Amino acid sequence: MAQKPSTPKGTRDFSPQEMLRRKYIFGTIEKVFQKYGFLPLETPAMENLETLTGKYGEEGDRLIFKILNSGDAWKEVSEDVKAKLKAGEEVHPGKLATQLSEKALRYDLTVPFARYVVQHQNEIAFPFKRYQIQPVWRADRPQKGRYREFYQCDADMIGSKSLLNEVELVQLFDDVFTDLGLAVVIKINDRKVLSGIAEISGQPEKVVDMVTAIDKLDKIGREKVEEEMRNKGITDDAIARIAPLFSLSGSWKEQRPQLEQWLAPSAVAQQGLKDLAFTFDAVANMKSARLEFDPTLARGLDYYTGAIFEVKSSEGTMPGSICGGGRYDDLTGVFGLKGMSGVGISFGADRIYDVLLETNKFPAELGASTRVLFANFGEAEAVHCLKLLRQVREAGISAELYPDQVKMAKQFKYADDKGIAYVAIIGDNEMKQGIITVKDMKTGEQKAVKPEDLVALLQ
RNA sequence: GUGGGUGUAGCUCAGUUGGUUAGAGCGCCGGAUUGUGAUUCCGGAGGUCGUCGGUUCAAGCCCGAUCAUCCACCCCA
């Protein structure tokens, strides 16, 4: 009991039933990705630690899973660090970590993608569109809808500044969630609008602090947001200048003129609003999703520079977002390739799974199991079944033979547990008569058929 | 990293003010039915009560520590 085996904290096994459902989600997303011209890419589970550090902010660095150097990692630690530790002096945790570890598990798919693009820049035809469906790891504390190992399904295009890309990604979101049958709201904002707001406030250097506070508006309310801004050193004067943000309401069309007027002095903000207007106009009619402008949408990732996306389910109780994304003008800059603008989105498959399960949106028939089970009556009968088994499989029908000669009840229960539609019974009688008794597990009906009619019956 | 809840059978959970032998449902195994599952009836197995220590004549229950897990915050998919 106490030492029953388990998976590490925040990780899960995916049993066959769950896997069928997960494959359904991945398959749906992948099909749409391909329809939009994205090509598949995979990168290693681990990256060099220095590739990842510093890309996700201070908080992000803490959440990177570091891999202890193989061999005697301690031996490689420098003498001065060892001496300090021995003397009980403080050592910068980052310094010790980089000496003990030079590899880390990937934290997202975007940074490895950026690394890939820089490394292979001479082989890639730009604009480059890739999709990537792989697990990522974060040393976070798990809770509802949050895991330490989870899958991201990313689609990014890099090497094009065109807003048509943003438009396409919105339509891609719409396609995927229409196919999954889930009603969602796609929230959109533009980092330039947020920069403009910071400009208007008179403290443009505080954009990040301002934005992370504003992002929490619907969660903690205006007062707490203002309190947090004050704590971050934003002046009361600046906060007062931001005030019009809180009184915005209505649709994009209604908010746009208000914003244009309020942010008139800021050229950046005007550009952001213009870009948003383009996207809204070009997207036009959507299949099932709703596109919403949300001026308080900020998202933590520092590298976003233009559009910001977030998708939330309109159904179920999932509080967090199920997708995210945005434009980054200089993602590859840190790896030495300047001026590459890109825009990408990411589907949180695990959260989508939770929402679809809760709202009962999974199709009832998912990758049905074996179609027919041949009961085992003994060696001679089983060998006889092998021929039929081959014939059925050649016809594209999944079939299996029960491997052991055990009680019929047990074999039927196996078929029942596994949801197998038919059981083929070939015992003494059937052998003599050259027939097969086929039982329909759903209706309980049985009928005798000739071997040549078996495939037709099962189809 | 901060705060809170919960750890009893394979699973979901009861268990009274501390008091004999710790229960239920589901699942599992066997039988009713040696050629028939899901349904019915009968029977059976399965628990160091997370771990270590303390209080007590006596601890599943009280206290402390520890581990695990869940929830919330931070942050995020």
Image: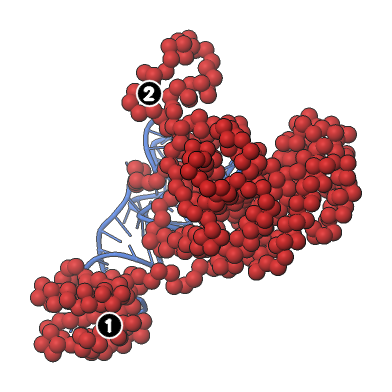
How many marks do you count on the picture?
2
Reading the image, the residue beneath label 2 is: A73
Instruction: Report in which chain the residue with disc 2 lies.
Output: A
The mark that comes first in sequence, 1 or 2, is: 2
Q: Position of residue A382 (x, y in %)?
A: 15, 74
Instruction: Report in which chain the residue with disc 1 lies.
Output: A
Query: Disc 1 and disc 2: Cα gap in Å?
Result: 62 Å
Q: Amino acid at mark 1?
A: Val
Q: Nearer the viewer, residue A267 or A438?
A: A267
Give the drawing colour for chain B.
Answer: blue
Neighbourhood count class around disc 1 (C-alpha, 10 Å): few under 14, some 14–19, many 20 upward: some
Determine whether the residue tagged by mark 2 lies in a helix, strand or loop. helix
Q: Position of residue A199 (x, y in %)?
A: 82, 37
Give the residue drawn at x 53%, y 63%: A35
Q: Quadrant of residue A166?
A: bottom right
Give the drawing colour for chain A.
Answer: red
For residue A327, side relative to residue A136 (left or right) = right
Q: Is residue A155 above or below residue B57?
A: below
Give the residue drawn at x 40%, y 29%: A68
Q: Position of residue A83 (x, y in %)?
A: 45, 10
Reading the image, the residue beneath label 1 is: A455
For residue A7, side relative to residue A404 (left or right) = right
Determine whether the residue tagged by mark 1 lies in a helix, strand or loop. helix
Q: Nearer the viewer, residue A263 or A233?
A: A263
